[in-house]
Amino acid sequence: MAIVSIATALMLAACGGTGAGGGAATSASAGGSAAAGDTLVGVAMPTQTSERWIADGNAVKEGLEKAGYKVDLQYANDDIPTQTQQIDAMITAGAKLLIIAAIDGTALTSQLETAASKGIKVIAYDRLIRDSENVDFYVSFDNYKVGVAQATALLYGLGVTDRDGKATGTATKGQKIELFAGSLDDNNAHFFWNGAIDTLKPYITDGTLVVGSGQDTIEQAATLRWLQETAQKRMEDLLTSTYGGKGTGLKGVLSPYDGISRGIITALQGVGMGPSIKEGLPVVTGQDAEIASVKLIADGVQQSTIFKDTRKLAAQAVTAAQDFLSGKTPTPNNTTDYDNGKKVVPSFLLEVDTVYADTIQAMLIDSGYWTEDEVKSGVAK
Ligand code: GAL
């Protein structure tokens, strides 16, 4: 069974569809032995304000439909009560399995209890659902490594290490940086932060880097709901409180997500920095390869992003769903790291890549994730 599952996963990943903006995740109903027929699968996604979740939702839906399932795909506008109501409605409508990317990872306990009492399997999608026994599987990326990759990109941009994280030994001392984190109710935010801080720590300890504002805890750095405007406001406040209102001396900003990066960049440019890195804009990292940020990277404005191929994640979720719905147990590749407070949830984690201006072509265009036109315009077609 394990071999079948892995083979299916690889096949589905290899069949990755036509693009981030709505590419199919799978090509056929590979591996599903039970007749899918009228089986309904509920897919709960957090928000449509970020392209990545639209791409995720579309890819999961198409993959499940190709496998013969009926799909109820819902977005919750980043509103917790909306998401709980949507999940309640999916259960009432007779869904046999739920795939959920939670808004607040701690807010779904009662929905999942109901699901379990009806024998409905639950797959946590990208974000771990916490405080519940009733999470059957988790598909995501290696979130700690995302944080390591973000910090490494920052270190590379500041001349402290090479792209692989090897110290150059020639870095300027006392370079000022600022740190941003994601939403504290999203389990991933903590993994990204820990990976990044573990990577930056030695260089903060030896004085190569200095967190100018002194705001170096995840609570201080957090951005509720990952909102661009919230990040922009915090960056503006930091520029006023710590950098003389002009950004004087600020060299780099750790950002965990492209929306946050664009908020930070707007604030920096707003006080006259840049507009590009060449012209003195601080190095700003990112995540998700959102098209607006990929354009900024191509234009030399945002330094990097972490590419998480949502087509592969969707394919993985579809494989796990097919396994559960045909009475099998999906095969995890991690059974140690994702403790949700009640149990360690068996997980399947995918690898990530760092994108810089000179790797956009190979990683994003050649792989069919974005087209050249989309990168040029910064808009998903
Ligand atoms: C996280 C996810 C990131 C990013 C962020 C904001 O849970 O892992 O890739 O999308 O949410 O949406």
Image (cartoon, helix red, strand yellow):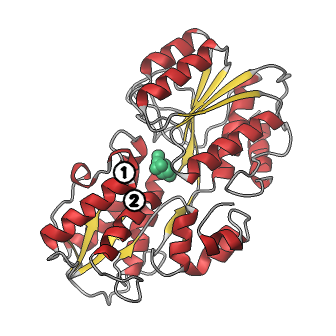
* Relative horizontal placement of residue 172, taking residue 349 as reference (left or right): left
x and y percentages locating residue 126 in the rendered image: 54, 43
For residue 169, above or below residue 343:
below
Quadrant the C terminus occupies? bottom right
Residue 60 position, x and y percent, is 69, 40
Per the image, label 2 sits on a secondary structure element best described as: helix
- Relative to 278, is 130 above or below? above
**Toward the viewer: 56 or 35?**
56
Task: Name the residue furthest top.
Answer: 117
Whether the residues at callouts 1 and 2 have beta carbons within 8 Å, the answer is yes
Would you place residue 185 above or below residue 229 in this image?
A: above
Q: Which residue is mark 1?
A: 182
Q: Visible in this render: residue 181?
A: yes
Look at mark 2 in the image and give the residue it sits on: 260
Tell me the distance, in whole angstroms, between the alpha carbons under discs 1 and 2.
8 Å
Q: Position of residue 168 (x, y in %)?
A: 38, 86
Indicate if the residue with disc 1 has its beta carbon within 8 Å of ligand 1: yes
Q: For the point 63% across and 56% down, which residue is it?
A: 309
The numbered mark, 1 or 2, whose residue comes first in the sequence reads 1
